[in-house]
Amino acid sequence: MSIKTYYKEIQSIPEIVPELDNFVIDIAKRSGMNPEKFNNLSLSFSEALSNSIIHGNKCDPQKKIKITIDVNEQKMIIKIKDEGKGFDLKSVPDPTKDENILKESGRGIHIMKSFLDDLYYNFSEDGTETVLVLNLK
């Protein structure tokens, strides 16, 4: 099984998100992803990247974010690695509960999980890696 790998390293500045979103969608198009999945990919990638920039690296332009995209015949795997301290996944409030419905934040992980085939996090001493998996077809 052939794997194509793409890589970018960026500064932690929110203004770069649209440019990188275009980069990811371009790769999806060239990889033969079903066009109906582009919106799910775009929203999930932008959310994950924004989280890494804002929450992980605290918008510190001295801190880097590494983006690795692996694509094979069946799926696209996107890894977004920040230099942040991580977070406790269990402490993220459920946005579907009544007490959280009107909150302005806290829906990102829930939305990404509903749009992706898999979403998980790798926490280490040198940062947090968000992994997004989306089947091409």
Image (tube, rainbow, N blue to C red):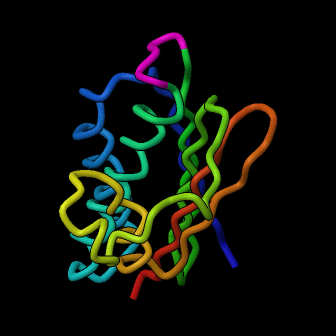
Name which residue lies at 21% across and 82% down.
36
Front-most of residues 129 and 104: 104
Q: Residue furthest top?
A: 62
> Which of 117/105 is in front?
105
The answer to which quarter of the image holds residue 17 is top left
**Quarter of the C terminus within the rendering:** bottom left
Q: Is residue 76 above or below residue 58?
A: below
Question: Which quarter of the figure is the N terminus placed in?
Answer: bottom right
Q: Residue at x 53, y 34 (%)?
A: 56
Residue 28 % position (x, y):
36, 65
Q: Quadrant of residue 50?
A: top left
Magenta span: chief secondary structure: loop
| Image spot of residue 71 (x, y percent) | 55, 67
- Outermost residue toward the right in this view: 125
Where in the figure is residue 33, as x and y percent of width and height?
Answer: 35, 77
User: Is residue 95 covered in magenta?
Assistant: no
Count of residue discs: 0
Magenta stretch in the rendered image: 58-62
Say above or below: 21 vs 33. above
**Residue at horizontal 76%, vertical 31%?**
126
- Furthest-bottom residue in this view: 137
Residue at point 22%, 78% (across, down): 35
- Could you say where residue 115 lies in the image, as x and y percent from the top left? 35, 77
**Quadrant of residue 94 in the image?**
bottom left
